[in-house]
Amino acid sequence: MPHFFFDIHDHELSHRDEEGSEWPDTASAQDQGRRLLADIARDEAFRHDPLHLSVSIRDARRRVVATCALSLASTLVG
């Protein structure tokens, strides 16, 4: 099964995945990248500043094969 690495970036810090994990194909790895973003956004939902997250997905050769991004912001009105 192919091996993929998920590097997480936000406007404050980055985490480079050195261990990686196995997924059936690139599409499955991209689905996992989206799940990672959703999990992080859920944990960070009460931040008052905008949230800008991205995941770079690298293959076993360490080449970026997909990216996922998520931005979350809220504004009080009235």
Image (cartoon, rainbow, N blue to C red):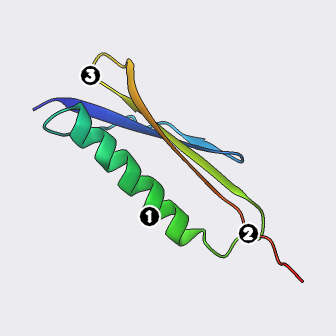
- Sequence-first disc among 1 and 3: 1
Residue at 30% over, 47% down:
31
Q: Secondary structure at mark 3?
A: loop
Residue 39 badge: 1
Please state which amino acid type lies under the numbered disc 1: Asp
Q: Which residue is mark 2?
A: 74
Q: Nearer the viewer, mark 1 or mark 2?
A: 2
Q: Which residue is mark 3?
A: 60
Inter-mark Cα distance, 1 to 2: 18 Å
Residue at 24% over, 32% down:
26
Image height of 49 relative to 56, above or below: below
Q: Residue 51's spot in the image, x, y percent?
A: 67, 57
Q: Secondary structure at mark 1?
A: helix
Q: Residue 9's spot in the image, x, y percent?
A: 58, 42
> Does any portion of residue 21 appear in the rendered image?
no
How many circles with numbers are drawn on the protein?
3
